Amino acid sequence: MNEEVQFVIDTAKEMMDKAINHLDAELGVLRAGKASPRMLDTVVIDYYGNQTPISQVANIGTPDAKTIAIQPWEKTMIEPIERAIINANLGFAPMNNGEMIRISIPALTEERRLLLVKQVSSEGENARISLRSARKDANDEIKKLEKDGLSEDEAKTAQDEVQKQTDCYSGKIDSVVKAKEEDILKI
């Protein structure tokens, strides 16, 4: 396979990897009833004039399945972290004891679980749209190369390879979405 075609295929694979990584990031902040440090990934604080993720100014841990513990590296950061968590509108009520911040994760109601499952499905569909977009871009590039002298057989082989990648990544999306849905519905 020539270099230009391989570049197109590699670029499509890269875009599909990004779609999967984005899906993982989006699903990571959804709470499934048990505590996870990833729930705070979207929280940023003003740290000496810079918007900084909370994980870069504090240790975040889960002492048990229903609690997130945040230990700031500087005691002066306790109140800004607490404010940032409240302002992030994640539905958490942080408790500050002067040393660290604790967040108790409330149990999910059945209604909230069903809403989260819908949100997971929506994120999965967004990832599938990204896959189809990457496939379309790659196929368009292959068609351009075909007009510029790429043989019909090579073009067909390249398009088949892109389709194989798309199918593979689509399966990955399905399994990630299914696992997250099961996690949310598990009581």
Image (cartoon, helix red, strand yellow):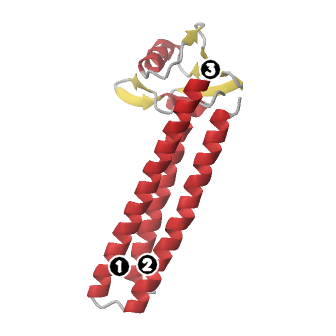
- Asked if residue 28 is positioned above or below residue 82 in the image, the reply reads below
Q: Which corner quadrant of the image does residue 148 belong to? A: bottom left
Q: Amino acid at mark 3?
A: Ile
Q: Position of residue 140 (x, y in %)?
A: 32, 73
Judged by depth in the image, the label closer to the viewer, 2 or 3, is: 2
Q: Which residue is mark 3?
A: 105
Q: Which residue is mark 2?
A: 159
In-image side of 17 versus 143 (left or right): right
Tell me, yes or no, whether the two marked residues, 2 and 1, touch with CB atoms within 8 Å. yes
Total marks placed: 3
Secondary element under disc 1, as helix, strand or loop, is helix
Q: Amino acid at mark 2?
A: Gln
Q: CA distance from mark 2 to mark 1?
A: 7 Å
**Residue that appears at 28% across and 80% down:** 144
Which comes sooner in the sequence, label 1 or label 3? 3
Q: Position of residue 142 (x, y in %)?
A: 35, 79
Which comes sooner in the sequence, label 2 or label 1? 1
Q: Amino acid at mark 1?
A: Ile
Q: Residues within 10 Å of mark 3 (few under 14, many from 20)?
A: many
Secondary element under disc 2, as helix, strand or loop, is helix
**Residue that appears at 53% across and 72% down:** 164
- Asked if residue 169 is positioned above or below residue 8 in the image, the reply reads above
Q: CA distance from mark 2 to mark 3?
A: 47 Å
Which comes sooner in the sequence, label 2 or label 3? 3
Q: Position of residue 75 (x, y in %)?
A: 53, 14
State which quarter of the image contains the C terminus. Answer: top right
In-image side of 145 versus 47 (left or right): left
Which mark, by number, is residue 142?
A: 1
